[in-house]
Image (cartoon, rainbow, N blue to C red):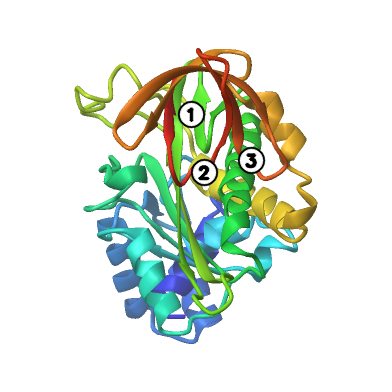
């Protein structure tokens, strides 16, 4: 790690505590000038670091900038196996991870960014990714999984996100089939899974699991087209300290526990419990056509069973259709 990265890890792991410049310099075997330059650079990056005469440097407990060191302190044994990297800005975390996967990167790489300039959701939709208020994260996976079972990754991730949001916020969540997480009737998280499939055997070469969570309301608010359909984990006036780093770690911890035994479908009961549409009328959108139906059930492969108005029943695959509720 660089001097800057070492100092960030030190202050981030001990928020509210003071360390003198001399103490840090001795610990890192660098000059006090190098420490001062690194502190100034961190402050320029947006970290709230106080410098007090005769006390030293301290990071404010309210600082909530994503960092590898801050996330790592909340990761459990399974989560610690992941290799987390954080960017200030990126075009798309999914695209970055896909590029790594294509070049042979091993499973377990996680890329996050404070903002995305070209974030994407399902069906090629743009994903609103403003700086400093959300979580934009992609995970590289190389599961021993057939393409037909790939929906398990997405639905498992939805449960991991739902449980994590409930843990940090104390509020209930719901899931809209197949993988949108809702709070109080509005969308708070979108998940996009992209994969490369071997034509030889139909198994996944790799999967990229992209997760976008609205944590706090941006200062300028949501765009007009999202105001009525999107929400945030916390209210805009709620000081959230280290919440984003903790939420990232919670999601990774929950996901990795399920992922280790993915085909056992240990997450399925939690998924069904939160599913919004079961027993309710939905509109099935397929091949640019819409049909009225009732959502009946979810099978073990997370296909949605619907009954159309004429009495016909069908199991829907998320790759083929979407639904409106």
Residue that label 1 marks: 233
Tag 1, which secondary structure?
loop
Task: Relative to 137, say whether 206 is above or below.
Answer: below
The residue sitting at 49% across, 70% down in the picture is 197
Q: Is residue 57 visible?
A: no
Q: Quadrant of residue 113?
A: bottom left
Foreground label between 1 and 2: 1
Residues at marks 3 and 2, CA–CA distance in whole angstroms: 34 Å
Residue that label 3 marks: 302
Q: Position of residue 211 (x, y in %)?
A: 46, 48
Question: In the image, 175: left or right of 59?
Answer: right
Image quadrant in which the C terminus is located:
top left
User: Tags 3 and 1 in contact by the CB under 8 Å rule?
Assistant: no
Q: Nearer the viewer, residue 40 or 165?
A: 165
Task: Relative to 33, say whether 187 is above or below.
Answer: above
Tag 2, which secondary structure?
loop
Question: In the image, 324: left or right of 272?
Answer: left
Count residues near mark 3 (Cα–Cα under 10 Å), then give few for <14, some for 14-19, many for 20+.
Answer: many
Count residues near mark 1 (Cα–Cα under 10 Å), then give few for <14, some for 14-19, many for 20+.
Answer: many
Q: Earlier in the sequence, mark 1 or mark 2?
A: 1
Q: Nearer the viewer, residue 234 or 295?
A: 295
């Amino acid at each position: 790690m660089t001097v800057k990265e070492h100092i960030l890890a030190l202050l981030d792991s001990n928020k509210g505590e003071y360390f003198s410049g001399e103490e840090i310099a001795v610990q890192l075997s660098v000059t006090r000038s190098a420490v001062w330059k690194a502190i100034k650079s961190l402050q320029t990056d947006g970290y709230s670091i106080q410098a007090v005469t005769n006390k030293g440097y301290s990071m404010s407990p309210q600082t909530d900038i994503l960092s590898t060191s801050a996330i790592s302190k909340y990761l459990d044994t399974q989560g610690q196996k992941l290799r987390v990297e954080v960017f200030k800005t990126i075009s798309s975390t999914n695209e970055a991870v896909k590029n790594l996967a294509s070049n042979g990167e091993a499973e377990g790489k996680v890329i996050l960014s404070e903002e995305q300039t070209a974030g994407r959701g399902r069906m090629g939709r743009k994903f609103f990714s403003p700086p400093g208020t959300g979580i934009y994260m992609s995970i590289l996976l190389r599961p021993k999984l057939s393409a037909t079972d790939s929906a398990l990754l997405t639905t498992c991730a939805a449960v991991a996100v739902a449980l994590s949001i409930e843990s940090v916020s104390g509020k209930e969540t719901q899931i809209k089939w197949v993988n949108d997480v809702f709070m109080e009737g509005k969308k708070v998280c979108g998940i996009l899974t992209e994969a490369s499939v071997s034509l030889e055997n139909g198994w996944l070469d790799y999967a990229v699991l992209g997760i976008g969570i609205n944590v706090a309301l941006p200062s300028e608010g949501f765009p007009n087209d999202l105001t009525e359909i999107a929400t945030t984990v916390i209210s805009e006036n709620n000081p959230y300290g280290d919440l984003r780093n903790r939420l990232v770690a919670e999601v990774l911890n929950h996901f990795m526990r399920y992922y280790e035994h993915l085909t056992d479908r240990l997450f399925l009961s939690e998924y069904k419990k939160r599913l919004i549409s079961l027993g309710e009328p939905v509109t099935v959108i397929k091949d640019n056509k819409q049909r009225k139906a009732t959502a009946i059930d979810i099978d073990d492969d997370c296909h949605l069973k619907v009954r159309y108005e004429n009495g016909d029943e069908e199991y829907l695959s998320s790759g083929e259709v979407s639904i409106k509720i």
